[in-house]
Each structure stands twice: as C-alpha cells, then as structure tokens.
Amino acid sequence: MTGRVFFPPVQPLVMGIVNVTPDSFSDGGRFRDASAAIAHARSLVAQGADIIDVGGESSRPGAEPVSESEEMHRVLPVIEALAGEVRVSVDTTKPAVATAAIEAGATIVNDITSSLHPVAASRGVGWVAMHMQGRPQTMQTRPRYHDVVAEVVDFLVQRALTARADGVAEVWVDPGIGFGKTSHHNWTLLAELDRLVATGWPVTVGTSRKSFLGSALASADATPNPTAVDDRLEGSVATATHAAVAGAAMVRVHDVAATVGAMRAVAA
C-alpha cells in the first residue's frame, strides 16, 4: 500500500453560520430578525459550535450588495449579544462594518475579498482570507483557470504573507469553494486540499449545502434536478469530513450537530 492517510492531531474547529439576511442561498430570511438570529446562534453553540460567523450581506451568486448602514443594523445587535458567550466572526466585505463589528465584540474578520487585513492588523483580531474569482454578482459566469489548485494556493499564500507582514497574528486561508468555481473546480480543490494544507497556514473550508453538492447528490439518486438546499446534509458532512482528514483546521457549516459528531470521529 502506498501513500498515507493524515489524521489531524486535534479536533478541527466548527464555525456555525448565522445569516442575518433576507436572501442568503440557505436559510435566507429565517433569521433576519436579531432575536431570531441570536436564538439560532445560541442553539448552534449548544450543539458544539466553536465560533459563530455572523453575516449581514448575502454572497450567493448574483446577490446584490447592501449599504454599510443596513449591514451594521443587521449584524451589530447579534454580535453584541453573543460576544460574551462564544467567539464571534463577522462575515463582511466592508472595512467600516468590520471595524464596527470588532468594537461590538467580533474577534475574527471572515473576508471573501481577501482585502480587509489592514483592519484586522490595526484591531488585533484574526482574519480569514478567502479566494474568490470575480465578485458575487458575476463570479459564476464562466469561471476559468489554467490550474485551479496552483492559482488558489499561490493567491492565498501571498495574501497570508502580506497580512502577516502587516501585523496580523492569526491568519486563516480558505479556498473559496463555490466562489467563482465550477463543480469540477470545487471537487478538484477538495481532492487536492492537502496542497493548501502543506503551505502551513491554517485552512478553513466551507462546503455546507452548496449547489455542487446538490448536483452530486441528485446524480447519486438518479434524479434530474439538484437536491434541495435543506436536503444536502450527507454531502455537507462528507465533504467537511474529507476536509478535516486532509488537514483543514476549521470547517464552516450550517448543520453544526452532525458536523461536530463527524469532527469528533475524525479526531479520534
């Protein structure tokens, strides 16, 4: 038998997703009210989430941006309520929102644009750099790569090095599954995730409920249409488990309880 299987020495962190939005691809509108979002976040903590990622602007394909004031109105009450109970991340693309969220208690900036490291550096918080080709409005319009793994790895390493040089002590890298990638690109990145892990930067992966899983599950069931968003649990947990075995240090998910159980099994 050739090769080896890598088992992480510690249990990967689980980041629970809380979308305080009307239009996110999964659960959009369910938690747009602050009280509902706070209650949902607390339920995710009870299920074992290590971090709660609070977002007030959808980044689904085709999503339209919202104003700084509206985004702050959505996320700040939620962050303020949770900050004393669990570690909180803010999922934003705007420096002003990131700054306000940190003042409210967030200690990680989850950044799909990979541009907010100056905010993280100046405020002494963690930063997740994600790879995205294009922007949400256009990213799924014929994304192209010569070598998707090499291009994503090179981009993230450069972003991470820049952030570290600017003073960010806690840097995470995320290959951006579904952000300017075809299904083939997504599966290739997952299959070769060890190449990103090998760079030494802690890797976070988010596959939860994404459309490429709906297509794969439909194909497995021999059905013509992608599996509905809420019926992608098996694919979400399977890909999170694969990421953990490949060495990812954190997974970002909607279905916390099932994922926490899978991460415990991986760590064992």
Image (cartoon, grey):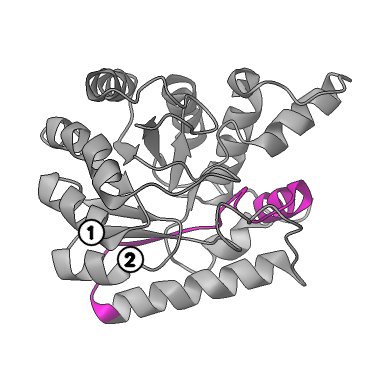
Q: Which residue is mark 1?
A: 96
Q: What is the CA distance from the residue labelled 2 to the residue labelled 1?
A: 10 Å
State the SS at label 2. loop
x and y, in percent, of residue 179 in the image: 59, 52
Q: Is residue 214 above or below residue 3?
A: above
Give me the residue at 78% from left, 50% from top: 184
x and y, in percent, of residue 62 in the image: 59, 46
Residue 99 shown left or right of residue 213 in the figure: left
Q: Which residue is mark 2?
A: 116
Q: Is residue 142 above or below residue 215?
A: below
Of residue 24 and residue 145, the one placed in the foreground of this image is: 24
The three-letter amino acid code for the residue at tag 1 is Ala
Of residue 178 and residue 61, the one placed in the foreground of this image is: 61
State the SS at label 1. helix
Residue count near mark 1 (Cα–Cα under 10 Å), binned few <14, some 14–19, many ≥20: some
Q: Is residue 187 above or below residue 36?
A: below
Which picture quadrant has residue 166? Answer: bottom left
111 in magenta? no
Instruction: Please report the bounds of the magenta region as a residue range.
Output: 166-191
Q: Is residue 200 above or below residue 52?
A: below
Q: Nearer the viewer, mark 2 or mark 1?
A: 1
176 in magenta? yes
The three-letter amino acid code for the residue at tag 2 is Leu
Q: How many marks?
A: 2
Mark 2 and mark 1 lie on one chain; the one further toward the N terminus is 1
Numbered label attached to residue 134: none
Give me the residue at 24% from left, 64% from top: 120
